[in-house]
Image (tube, rainbow, N blue to C red):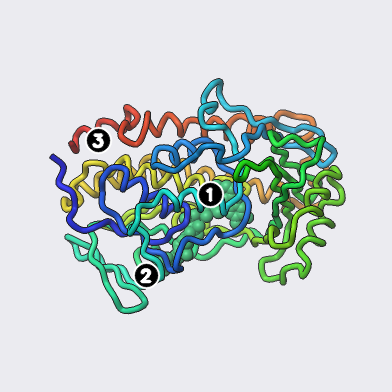
């Protein structure tokens, strides 16, 4: 028999990591409360792509994934449509989960929030203190209230208060890049929604993917360039995006033109540097950007955050949370499956940003010659990265109750 904790696990932050964690714990019958500083989850931004592992995780934690996004075949191109790499997953590995999907961020939040059982989300709860007392953790809130919990999951994003309190905050790593992105439902005959194109000129990225939203087809697009983090943002985002899109095929400008200003956002790109090797301390652990904030070059920050939640559910299933040693061992397993993969993705995304936007001007023609005429990019972003992502599907096991063989030993030892 499992001994379940009398008090709920406390998940801090209702972004993709926090909602996924709460849903995953609920799926395996662990009581949980999800504390969010705002009254309800707020989609930070407008566009998002999901790789297959995130979709598998969403399905297994009770989120409706029916027609959730446009399945896209992805190509890296130069700005004159020359194909540099095709994203190829190992045969048959991702079909069930759609490979790479384009959707809107509000849709993702809506679907995830809809899966939360009544009463799990506690809005207007700004966490300000975390004290591990050995047999429980005391979580404090801005309004002076406190709760006691067997486990805190810090899922409070890149500016994680929980991480700051538990580990101290590493400095922000500014990439000195910014991205402007938007979406539109105005269709273009020559651009299929099954297409994702990540294109680069000498200094700018101009990309698009298909999206599906509530049964409607459309496109999301983004342009990305070097931009000092302390330089003020362009005043007119749409006009600036159109300027950046000038050297790309005209369809990109068409998408930008047909996007309404309320569907256009800008983000400076930053992370917190390399992913820490240890995430957990006593009865506190982390998920999502709190430990692996990632440049959008990975298009995977939300996806990895969702998969974190899935693994927390899978690895805590049946664990007596009152037993500190059992909890520690489960959290070690969790780090075992998450740290290397997320660290690699964060490093790769940071490196891609530097290669495409930060190499000195005299080197750029040589770089582009290599990308246009050799298999370098195909190897990196076309084959090796998709293989690493597809391998996650195996690592996730059959479902949240059925860990992969390598993890099953730990699971059976606990039951
Ligand atoms: C331009 C851009 C494009 C991106 N594109 C993609 C993409 O295509 N695919 C992809 O997978 N990822 C993408 N990402 C990354 C993705 O957005 C993040 O990785 C993801 O949102 C992280 O989720 P999270 O839940 O960890 O953190 P967040 O989304 O930041 O959520 C943290 C939550 O914690 C709450 N919170 C904070 N502090 C407290 C507190 N003290 N008390 C209570 N609550 C608190 C916040 O209000 C928030 O709701 C992109 C990011 C950017 C910037």
Determine which of the numbered discs, if any, sits on residue 108 in the image.
1
Closer to the camera, 410 or 310?
310
Task: State the image coordinates of residue 241 (x, y, percent, origin top left).
Answer: 78, 57
Marks 3 and 2, Cα distance to the nearest angstrom? 32 Å
Which residue is farthest front? 215
* In-image side of 99 versus 337 (left or right): right
Which secondary structure, mark 2?
Answer: strand
Task: State the image coordinates of residue 249 (x, y, percent, origin top left).
Answer: 85, 42
Mark sitting earlier along the chain (3/2): 2
Residue 379 at least partly seen: yes
Which secondary structure, mark 3?
Answer: helix
Marks 3 and 1, Cα distance to the nearest angstrom? 32 Å
* In-image side of 169 versus 192 (left or right): left
Determine which of the numbered discs, if any, sits on residue 127 in the image.
2
Mark whose residue sits in front, 3 or 1 = 1
Crowdedness of circle 1 by 10 Å Cα count: few (<14), some, many (20+)? many
Marks 2 and 1, Cα distance to the nearest angstrom? 24 Å
* In-image side of 178 versus 287 (left or right): right
Determine which of the numbered discs, if any, sits on residue 410 in the image.
3
Q: Is residue 333 above or below residue 277?
A: above
């Amino acid at each position: 028999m499992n001994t379940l904790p009398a008090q709920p696990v406390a998940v801090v932050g209702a972004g993709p990591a926090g909602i996924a964690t709460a849903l995953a714990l609920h799926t395996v019958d662990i009581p949980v409360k999800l504390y969010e500083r705002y009254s309800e989850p707020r989609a930070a931004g407008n566009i998002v792509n999901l790789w297959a592992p995130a979709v598998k995780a969403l399905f297994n934690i009770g989120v409706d994934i029916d027609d959730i996004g446009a399945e896209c075949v992805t190509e890296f191109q130069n700005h004159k449509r020359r194909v540099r790499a095709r994203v190829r997953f190992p045969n048959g590995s991702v079909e069930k989960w759609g490979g790479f999907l384009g959707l809107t961020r509000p849709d993702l939040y809506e679907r995830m929030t809809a899966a939360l059982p009544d009463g799990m989300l506690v809005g207007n709860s700004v966490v300000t203190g975390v004290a591990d007392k050995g047999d429980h953790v005391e979580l404090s809130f801005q309004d002076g209230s406190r709760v006691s919990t067997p486990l805190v999951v810090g899922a409070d994003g890149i500016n994680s208060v929980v991480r700051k309190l538990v580990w101290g905050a590493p400095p922000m790593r500014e990439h000195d890049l910014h991205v402007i992105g938007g979406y539109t439902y105005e269709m273009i005959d020559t651009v299929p929604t099954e297409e994702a194109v990540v294109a680069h000129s000498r200094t700018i990225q101009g990309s698009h993917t298909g999206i599906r939203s509530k049964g409607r087809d459309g496109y999301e697009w983004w342009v990305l360039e070097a931009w000092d983090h302390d330089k003020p943002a362009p005043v007119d985002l749409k006009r600036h995006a159109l300027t950046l899109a000038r050297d790309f095929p005209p369809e990109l400008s068409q998408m930008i033109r047909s996007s309404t200003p309320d569907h256009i956002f800008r983000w400076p790109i930053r992370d917190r540097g390399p992913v820490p090797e240890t995430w957990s301390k006593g009865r506190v652990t982390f998920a999502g950007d709190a430990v692996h904030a990632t440049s959008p070059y990975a298009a995977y920050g939300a996806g990895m955050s969702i998969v974190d939640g899935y693994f927390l559910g899978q690895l805590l299933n049946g664990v007596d949370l009152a037993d500190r040693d059992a909890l520690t061992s489960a959290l070690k397993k969790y780090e075992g499956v998450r740290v290397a993969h997320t660290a690699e993705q964060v490093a790769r995304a940071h490196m891609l940003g530097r290669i495409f936007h930060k190499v000195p001007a005299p080197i750029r023609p040589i770089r582009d010659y290599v990308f246009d005429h050799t298999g370098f990019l195909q190897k990196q972003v076309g084959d090796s990265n998709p293989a690493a992502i597809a391998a996650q599907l195996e690592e996730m096991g059959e479902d949240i109750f059925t860990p992969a063989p390598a993890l099953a030993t730990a699971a059976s030892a606990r039951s």
